[in-house]
Image: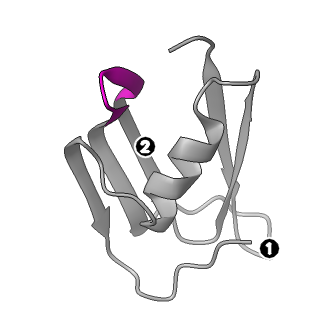
Amino acid sequence: MYGHTRFRTWGGSKSGEYTRCRHSLRLVQATKSYARRRVLDGITLTIYEKETLGIIGSNGSGKSTLLRLITGLVPPSAGKREVIKSNLRTG
């Protein structure tokens, strides 16, 4: 990786309570490589119900690749992607 990508999740209910009951999506030790270049290495991320994910990083740090893994547009080269809720929304 050329840079560092940071991600953070925010969540909660309308009453302001932060609830981590069920996860909707999980990446476990996900790695993505293109040819011989490793773009993401060992990402473990859990997104829970009603959470919002923010991703920041410099150019070339893997933000778009991470989003493609999360949405399922590309499969991980290693590791796994688990989707628990089928109504996961991106946008």
Q: Is residue 4 magenta?
A: no
Q: Amino acid at mark 2?
A: Leu
Name the side, left or right, on which 46 lies relative to 29: right
Magenta stretch containing residue 36, yes or no?
yes
Q: Measure how far apart labels 1 and 2 are at the Cα level.
A: 25 Å
Q: Label 2: how many residues lie within 10 Å, few (<14), some (14-19) or many (20+)?
A: some
Which one is in front in this view, the residue at disc 1 or the one at disc 2?
Answer: 2
Query: Disc count in the image?
Result: 2
- Label 1 is placed on what type of residue? Ser
Residue situated in front as seen by the camera: 8 or 76: 76
78 or 43: nearer the eye? 78
Residue at the location (63% across, 45% down)?
64
Residue at position x 33%, y 76% in the image: 84
| Residue 15 numbered tag | 1
x and y percentages locating residue 49 in the rendered image: 54, 71
Magenta region:
33-41
User: Quadrant where the C terminus lies?
Assistant: bottom right
Taking 47 as reference, is 17 left or right?
right
Q: Is residue 57 left or right of residue 5?
A: right
Q: Secondary structure at mark 2?
A: strand
**Residue at image mark 2:** 45
- Above or below, 21 against 30 in this view is below
Residue 82, x across and y down, in percent: 28, 64
SS majority, magenta? strand
Q: Residue at x 43, y 43 (%)?
A: 45
Q: Earlier in the sequence, mark 1 or mark 2?
A: 1
Q: Quadrant of residue 12?
A: bottom right
- Kindly indicate the quadrant of the structure image that contains residue 51: bottom right
The answer to whether the residues at label 1 and label 2 have Cβ atoms under 8 Å apart is no
Query: As displayed, is residue 78 above or below residue 59?
Result: below
